[in-house]
Image (cartoon, rainbow, N blue to C red):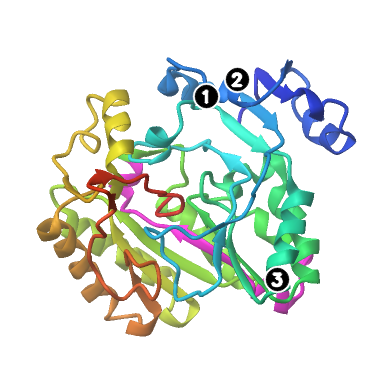
Amino acid sequence: MRGFSHIYIEKELIGDPELDPLLRRFPDAKLVEISHYKDVFNRRRQNREMQQRSQKLILARKRGRLIYPGAPVCQSFGEENFFYSSLVMNCIYDCEYCYLKGMYPSGNLLLFWNLPELFSELRELLRKGTVYLCVSYDTDLLALEGLFHLLLRFTDFLREEPGLRIEVRTKSGNRNFFKDFAGRLSKEDRERMIFAFTLSPERIIRSFEKRTGSLRARLESAEEAHALGFPIRLCFDPMIYCADWEQAYLELLHQVFRTFSPEEIRDVSVGSFRISGAYLRELRRALPRSVIAQFPYENDGGVCHYGRGLGERMEDFLLKELGKWIPEERIFRWNPAGSSGKAPGIPNLKENGKEAEIDFRGAFS
């Protein structure tokens, strides 16, 4: 990852000694003092695609709540106490279909320097019972670990809180991360840190998932994580339509099961591409020539998708093929209710006849 030419930092964070190690990693960056991150991140008439090509870093402290209940369009994998937190907004990867392009006006990276407050909020939740926390929704923390070391800072907390399980969703091929990380956790603690790898056919990766790890790199990274005792989840979500999608996804499965035996995979998820209608409008404005953005999706109550015919056919095909290797109870299909993952369908997300605001964090990444 290249460095940052500019780092925008909120006034109240200047002089924070805990930030010094991070700032020293970018000695050539120009520091710009700001009053509030929204003055930069939420400015009007930004060119998100241009910013994505040369990202700046914004350092801020988030006010208010830091942990949220899992969104209804996300896979909960049967977890009852399912939450997410977003310490970073935006991503160094540049996936053409990413909902973040429609969600945020800026393409710059925003890092919230709030780990102590997040841990305090987590402890309050853990007093009431176990917690399943997804920490890599609006970014790819594994891809950013060499810059921010946020996952490493979770290790002490994970050791102290046996009721906590963490999921890290990623498209990274950063296999070198796992050896040092595993050495900081006991075998039992590693079993509570789930790494969920989003997998796509190589032709989809090359065409639409810019800067991400190749399929081979992701599988090698997942293989290394599993060898060191971390549970591995494989996410075939989002499934992206292409002319020969059946063959593309068959080839993907063959590569997966040449790498892993079925017993080595904790579980898998399946879901075809879907996006909020509001986000899709922004995506289409930003990417007028994109075959993904301009596809004639159906809008069901505010969720745009391939349609019940194509979308369900794609998911049914992959579910049938996965069923040849993985037991049904370990296969989760996107479920609009956000619970067991067994029921297909599209939710009606309209309120008073109008399109509702839909939280797509973590639906796929």
Splitting the image into 4 quarters, where does residue 189 fall?
bottom right
Residue located 27% across and 44% down the image = 355
Q: Is the residue under label 2 in contact with that under label 3 (CB below 8 Å)?
A: no
Secondary structure at numbered mark 1: loop
Splitting the image into 4 quarters, where does residue 231 fall?
bottom right
The residue under label 3 is: 126
- The percent coordinates of residue 122 (x first, y second) are 70, 62
Q: Is the residue under label 1 in contact with that under label 2 (CB below 8 Å)?
A: yes
In the shown orientation, is residue 353 left or right of residue 51? left
The residue under label 1 is: 42
Dot placed on the residue nearer the N-terminal end, 3 or 2 = 2
Which kind of residue does numbered mark 1 sit on? Answer: Asn
Q: Quadrant of the N terminus?
A: top right
Residue located 69% across and 53% down the image = 151
Q: Is residue 256 visible?
A: yes
The residue under label 2 is: 39
